[in-house]
Image (spheres, rainbow, N blue to C red):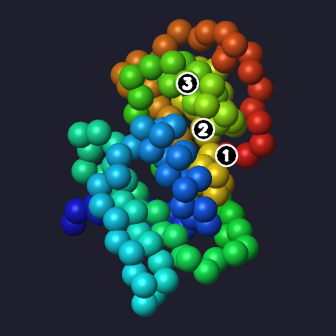
């Protein structure tokens, strides 16, 4: 068995791509538009990684998709959790679960998909403002 991808439905493809590509740093691997099915599929991956996420954009979807925690989350390993969270925060991304432990943080996509960020290797020593920052919302 070989892992292929995780599919996420998105209501605003431009906002989703801004988050996953421009803010999170994934790259677009391929794209498929279906005029007959009225949808676009965009596959994204992290640099040097075969694992992909598929953003499914249904052209006629006007209402937000119901969000639920049944999906779980996407997880990405990062070189420096504090630097990554600060860069994302400066781009307007809410850090829902700050990296108080120097190891783990959670953010959300514009459609409410949870994304876990994990420190590569050992946890970094606790550092402010993260160590005392409270959680925001759900993740």
Percent of width and height locating residue 112: 65, 54
Residue extending farthest front: 35
The residue that mark 2 highlights is 106
Q: Is residue 76 visible?
A: no
Q: According to the image, label 1 marks what residue?
A: 139
Q: Is residue 129 visible?
A: yes
Q: CA distance from mark 1 to mark 2?
A: 6 Å
Q: Position of residue 135 (x, y in %)?
A: 75, 32
Residue 128: x and y, percent?
67, 10
Which circle's residue, 1 or 2, is located before the other in the chain?
A: 2
Element under disc 2: strand
Which residue is the site of mark 3? 87
Quadrant assignment, res 26: top left
Of pointers 3 and 2, the one earlier in the residue sequence: 3
Circle 1 — which element? Answer: loop
Q: Quarter holding the N terminus?
A: bottom left
Q: Residues within 10 Å of mark 1 (few under 14, many from 20)?
A: some
Q: Earlier in the sequence, mark 1 or mark 3?
A: 3
Asked whether disc 1 touches disc 2, contact meaning CB atoms under 8 Å apart, the reply is: yes
Q: Is residue 23 above or below residue 70?
A: above
Q: CA distance from mark 1 to mark 3?
A: 19 Å
Q: Residue at x 73, y 73 (%)?
A: 63
* Label 2 CA crowd tier, 10 Å (few <14, some 14–19, many 20+): many
3 vs 2, front mark: 3
Circle 3: is it few (<14), some (14-19), or many (20+) Cα within 10 Å?
A: some
Q: In the depicted view, which residue is nearer to us: 60 or 2? A: 60
69 to the left or right of 25: right
In screen coordinates, is 131 left or right of 3?
right
User: Gap between marks 3 and 2, in whole Å?
Assistant: 14 Å
């Amino acid at each position: 068995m070989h892992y292929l991808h995780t599919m996420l439905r998105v209501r605003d493809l431009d906002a989703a791509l801004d988050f996953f590509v421009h803010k999170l740093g994934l790259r677009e691997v391929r794209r498929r538009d279906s005029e007959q099915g009225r949808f676009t599929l965009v596959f994204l991956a992290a640099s040097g990684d075969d694992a992909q996420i598929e953003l499914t954009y249904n052209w006629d979807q006007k209402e937000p998709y119901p969000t639920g925690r049944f999906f779980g989350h996407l997880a990405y390993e990062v070189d420096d959790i504090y630097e990554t969270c600060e860069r994302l925060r400066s781009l307007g991304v809410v850090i829902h679960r700050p990296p108080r432990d120097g190891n783990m943080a959670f953010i959300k996509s514009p459609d409410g998909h949870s994304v876990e960020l994990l420190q590569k290797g050992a946890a970094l020593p606790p550092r402010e403002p993260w160590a005392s920052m409270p959680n925001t919302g759900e993740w």
